[in-house]
Amino acid sequence: MACCQPVKQNWRPRYGAAFAHPSLEPKPRRTPAGSAMRIIAITLKGRPMPHSTIDTVDRGDYVNRYGPTAGRALPTGTQRLKTPTVDIHAHVAVPEAAAYIAPHLVMTDIAMVRHSNAETKSINMTQDADRKVAMVDVDDRLAVLDAMGIDFQVVAPPPFQCYYSVPVEHAVRASRMVNEGIAGFVAKRPDRFAGLGTVAMQDPAEAVKELEHCMITLGFKGVEVLTNVHGAELAAPQFAPFWKRAEELGALVMIHPNGFTHGDRFHDYYFSNVIGNPLETTIALHHLIFSGTLERMPNLKILAVHGGGYLPSYSGRIDHAWGARKDSHADLPHPPTHYLRKVYFDNVVFTPHQLEYLVKVYGADKIVMGTDYPYDMCDYDPVEHVISAGLSAEDTAKVAGSTAARLLGITL
């Protein structure tokens, strides 16, 4: 499978007439016969898109506009690759952990909730109900992956299941429940899934213990952490033992936002997510770089989702400040972008030119394909997005799968 050029050919998927489209590549799949495939087509201008369990049409109804992104032009047909494909950024939920933690969780402690207006909260509740099956059902997820042309997916908890604001004893227990739940999901199809866990970061010693459990006992590829720990920066000194152990274990640490902590101006228009999430990641990366965390631990494997937020596209400013001011220079022996280039970014940026830019500046060896499935801000055709960037055949194959496979230590 050396070629990575887009493939178009006539083929009718096994999921039924709703998915018939003359440009899906038939890849061999290992989905068990007779599985319950709860999947429909969302069509825009005659182009079907897969989605699971959510009964919408076109780009969706007024509340749930899932399917083809408005962030880039629609192609004339769906395109797939012959080379292996990996989605490194997706989520599964563990309802048992959510039920356990509910009595101990103050929802307004979560920035995404605190800085959202009534309309946004109402839509979020509707979407949460829509996603119930998509968040937990393995067969349902496999059907979606097959339709998207994805061979392998890394699943992590939804950010709401990183419990940093509750008492430590409850966070520790709930984190273990989440991790065991994700391990159970992965175990049903380990040829198609790998897991990232969660840890109780508010207690660094407990975080290290659970990180070890995730990596050594459960066989996970790493963990997901939020962009701050209930307001504390990830680069704060108390978290150094976690970062050091993550480096020693070769754990991938996926940094994921959950709303902006100081989002008083973000209540309307879903800005708590639209602006706030990338901004949170931007700030977290700044702190990890300028604090010297990445200088002291050069072998850390960090994935910054949503294309790394705003920093990768405006990185010249940090180098300028480093050279212009003593306080910005800190104790870094190299310009800040030296450390930024050690970070991995996913392609959940929606536009071809932004993906092309990330590859041009940081290299295809640092850019990986993601979806953020099954959320509203998901890219529901990630393979097409990679193809749309007009990269070389080699770089297309790297972004779509081989860079992630190397990072995760998997063979496809």
Image: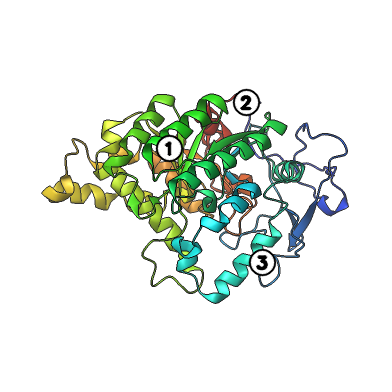
Q: Earlier in the sequence, mark 3 or mark 2?
A: 2
On the image, numbered disc 1 is attached to which residue? 207
In which quarter of the view is residue 218 placed?
A: top right
Residue 136 as seen in the image, left or right of residue 356: right
Residue shown at the point (59%, 63%) measured from the top left: 70
Tags 3 and 2 touching, CB below 8 Å: no
Residue 65 visible in the picture: no
Of the two numbered discs 3 and 1 on the same chain, state the one appearing first in sequence. Answer: 3
How many numbered circles does the render carry? 3
Instruction: Give percent across and percent down for residue 376.
Output: 61, 59
The amino acid sitting under disc 3 is Thr
Q: Quadrant of the N terminus?
A: top right
Considering only order in the chain, which callout, 1 or 2, is on the residue closer to the N terminus? 2
Task: State whether residue 202 is above or below residue 231.
Answer: above
Tell me if residue 262 comes above or below residue 389 in the rendering: below
The answer to whether residue 72 shows anywhere in this view is yes
User: 150 left or right of 116?
Assistant: right
Q: Residues within 10 Å of mark 1 (few under 14, many from 20)?
A: many
Residue drawn where x is 33% and y is 51% of the image: 232
Label 1 is placed on what type of residue?
Ala
The residue identified by callout 2 is 2
Closer to the eye: label 3 or 2: 3
Residue type at mark 2: give it.
Ala
* Circle 3 residue: 126
Secondary structure of residue under mark 2: loop
Image point 50% across, 47% down: which residue? 170
x, y percentage for residue 62? Answer: 67, 73
Q: CA distance from mark 3 to mark 1?
A: 33 Å
CB contact under 8 Å: marks 2 and 1: no
